[in-house]
Image (tube, rainbow, N blue to C red):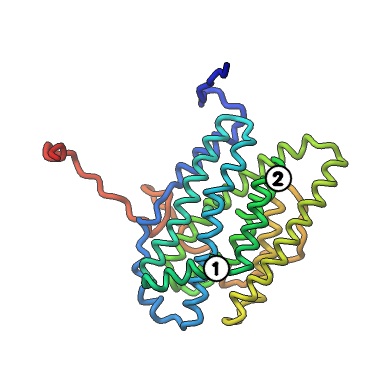
Amino acid sequence: MTIYNAVNWNLIDDLLDKITYEKLTEQFWLSTRMPVSKDKSDWTKLPEVEKRLVEKVFGGLTMLDTLQSESGIDALRIDAKTKHEIAVLNNIQFMESEHARSYSSIFSTLNSKKEIEEIFRWARENDLLQNKARIIDEIYKIGTALEKKVASVYLESFLFYSGFYTPLYYLGKAKLINVAEVIKLIIRDESAHGAYIGYKFKLEFDQLSKDEQNQFQTWAYHLLYKLYDNEVKYTEELYDGVGWTEDVKVFLRYNANKALMNLGLSPLFPDTVEDVNPIVINGLSTGTTNHDFFSTVGNGYLLSVVEDMKESDYDF
Ligand code: MN3
Ligand code: MN3
């Protein structure tokens, strides 16, 4: 007979579960509260080739967040060691759905219905994007607990960045700043997700023998190369038209190293923060980091106005 246990937050097995749960709930946000419509005039002035780039980039990001919300977190939850870890993963899963939704609220401001349909068709038919999702999802479906965590950290800390480059570049040039503000909230979530899942990976990895560790590392680096190879092609397809490809590749390698660091593995590429385009670094360091007393969410976030309850509120 199954004995059902209630989750006890007064008895914590792993303090990082509690810390992460609190951090994630503190930084909770909703895309519909971000004033992206203010970017409409910036958008109108962009050259057509850049508009198409932004659309594809966000179409691709929507797909990765959809994958993470529908498949990734379910795959990780099966291996959870504590009830609190399950609670953290539930929070992450909901936020992945919100991330995916946020691109739709950007599209609904900037694009026509027909253009939006075109973006989703492109994402469905792009081989490189589909290939990236397939590589990750196959591991989610048949991988071991350790392999699934590696796939998830690669997605969270590496694969998103071929897309994030574009809004960060514009933010660095003070364009599309409200759209970029949404992206920065997503980036802040993803960095917490990558660090947390990487930490859970390390706990398990440390239990392996030296031989097993070496063998596993070879697998992890092999997977990174495979994803990087696909990512380079994806980047060329997206960015060759605007001439940013080589800069994006530097940013990919820089973030691939960060993904490895989250897993406690040595960096693979020589690229450091100094090699990344300073406009993008400027974008990364602008905006959301200025928090005021009332909001830990960021500059543009619209706090809802709370009114006193009236008798008439109960008349339906
Ligand atoms: Mn996400
Ligand atoms: Mn995430």
Tell me the quarter of the image containing the N terminus: top right
Count residues near mark 1 (Cα–Cα under 10 Å), then give few for <14, some for 14-19, many for 20+: some
Q: Position of residue 258 (x, y in %)?
A: 68, 56
Numbered mark located on residue 143 in the image: 2
Q: Nearer the viewer, residue 76 or 295?
A: 76
Q: Is residue 76 visible?
A: yes
Q: Is residue 231 above or below residue 292?
A: below
- Residue farthest toward the top in the current orientation of the protein: 1
Q: Position of residue 188 (x, y in %)?
A: 53, 53
Tell me the quarter of the image containing the C terminus: top left
Residue at 60% over, 36% down: 16
Q: Nearer the viewer, residue 121 or 268?
A: 121
Residue at 12% over, 38% down: 315
Q: Is residue 49 above or below residue 177?
A: below
- Element assignment for label 2: loop
Residue at 50% over, 56% down: 186
Q: Along the horizontal axis of the image, is 182 left or right of 135?
A: left
- Element assignment for label 1: helix
- To which quarter of the image does residue 3 belong? top right
Residue at 64% over, 61% down: 132
Q: Position of residue 73 (x, y in %)?
A: 57, 44
Residue type, mark 1 in image: Asn
Residue type, mark 2 in image: Gly
Q: Which residue is mark 1?
A: 282
